Amino acid sequence: MEAVKERVLKFAIEGEIKEIRPLGNGLINDTFKVVTAGEGPDYVLQCVNHAIFKDVDLLQSNIEAVTAHIRTKLEAAGEKDLDRKVLRFIPLKDSPKTYYFDGEKYWRVSVFIKDAFTFETVNPEYSYYAGKAFGNFEAMLADIPAKLGETIPDFHNMELRSRQLKEAIAADPVGRMADPEVQAIAAEIAEYDFEMCKAERMYREGVLPKRICHCDTKVNNMMFDAEGNVLCVIDLDTVMPSFVFSDFGDFLRTAANTVAEDDPAVDKVAFRMDIFEAFAKGYIESASCFLTPVERENLPYGALLFPYMQAVRFFADYINGDTYYKIKYPEHNLVRTRNQLALFRSAKSHMAEMASFIQSL
Ligand code: GN1
Ligand code: MG
């Protein structure tokens, strides 16, 4: 940890470093908690995965613009305790930059929000609050003056994800396509390819806008206080222009699944309508100020799209020999694929119900 400590010391933090220890369970970046002595805050140190986020300068400037914009709005609304309600990134000691490049890796430091919790699962009540919070996050960013870049170009572009999977299948670099189960999965995915690429077509036709979205609204990317109030949204690397389905769909993908995204018990996977209803209600309450009718009526499609897209991404990574997501065992990405496909099937069986619920709001 000595080398890691040296990186932290490049930043203008308060107090002496007492301890640095691993934090959280993200699949992309490496995260640590930096405990300090004295009155000042503790911090979160992250090593940004540069293989995935190629332009860290753009990424941090997006995050700076977003957090500054939200901070200004919260301040104007008379909110107190802002360091608990929006992330604050620490500049370097010798420059206003909020990241440090050590010649090999990129590092950044933000204020640790104490007495705050993230959850891997939530009940309907918390889903309702989360819906309000993610809708509000998009609403606050609807008038951001800065033009944000795509930190991962075409991140949630289903046509691209589908193409990447087709390329992986054609190349089959580690021979995983020989397995009949893998072939069956490929066939099932192909069946829904055209239907799931609908958002990109609507965008080209000019009927679906892009907005500033969070693009990684996994349930564990939201912080709650001890009383269950939403504090803030974290993990801002993927904040970029996208369709509203990104935030609506990815939350439900993680929160409405009866089990974790990598649970091998596929027969236990189901899409929870109680979570859908609570989340949709909260989301629409705070997003209705900007949602168009097309966006609103396609929210159920968004709830289908994300399990599907995630299945495609996990599956492509499995075929490619596990080069993107962190894995804990060799078949991890295949297990994740089966799980997400099962969730897709379950969500699909609730399409009509979802549509009439949205209409009823
Ligand atoms: C990644 O970093 P983490 O675990 O919050 C991924 C998401 C996936 C998710 C699947 C930049 O998010 O898009 O939905 O794993 N982030 C990136 O669990 O690819
Ligand atoms: Mg995360």
Image (tube, rainbow, N blue to C red):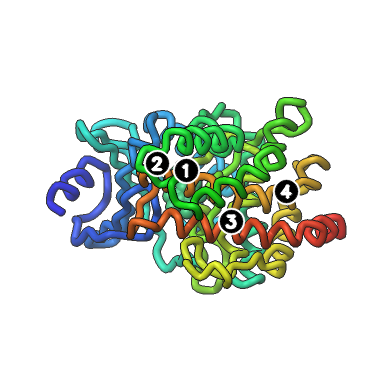
Residue at 72% from the left image edge and 31% from the top image edge = 201
Q: Earlier in the sequence, mark 2 or mark 4?
A: 4
Comparing labels 3 and 4, the label whose residue is closer to the camera: 3
Q: Are marks 3 and 2 in contact (CB under 8 Å)?
A: no
Distance Cα–Cα, label 3 vs label 2: 18 Å
As drawn, the label of residue 301 is 4
Q: Name the amino acid, label 3.
A: Leu
Q: Earlier in the sequence, mark 1 or mark 4?
A: 4
Query: Measured along the vertical axis of the image, is residue 169 above or below residue 37?
Result: above
Front-most of residues 349 and 157: 349
Q: Secondary structure at mark 1?
A: helix
Q: Residue furthest left?
A: 2
Q: Secondary structure at mark 3?
A: helix
Q: Name the amino acid, label 1.
A: Ala
Distance Cα–Cα, label 1 vs label 2: 6 Å
Distance Cα–Cα, label 3 vs label 4: 15 Å
**Residue 356, how many percent across, how many down?**
85, 58
Q: Which residue is mark 1?
A: 316
Specify whether 97 is left or right of 232. left
Q: Are marks 3 and 4 in contact (CB under 8 Å)?
A: no
Specify whether 337 is left or right of 176. right
Specify whether 225 is left or right of 109. right
Q: Earlier in the sequence, mark 3 or mark 1?
A: 1
Q: Which residue is mark 3?
A: 341
Distance Cα–Cα, label 1 vs label 4: 22 Å
As drawn, the label of residue 320 is 2
Label 1 Cα neighbours within 10 Å, binned few <14 / some 14-19 / many ≥20: many
Front-most of residues 343 and 139: 343
Quadrant into which the C terminus falls: bottom right
User: Mark 4 CB in 8 Å range of ligand 1?
Assistant: no
**Residue 345, how many percent across, how many down?**
66, 58
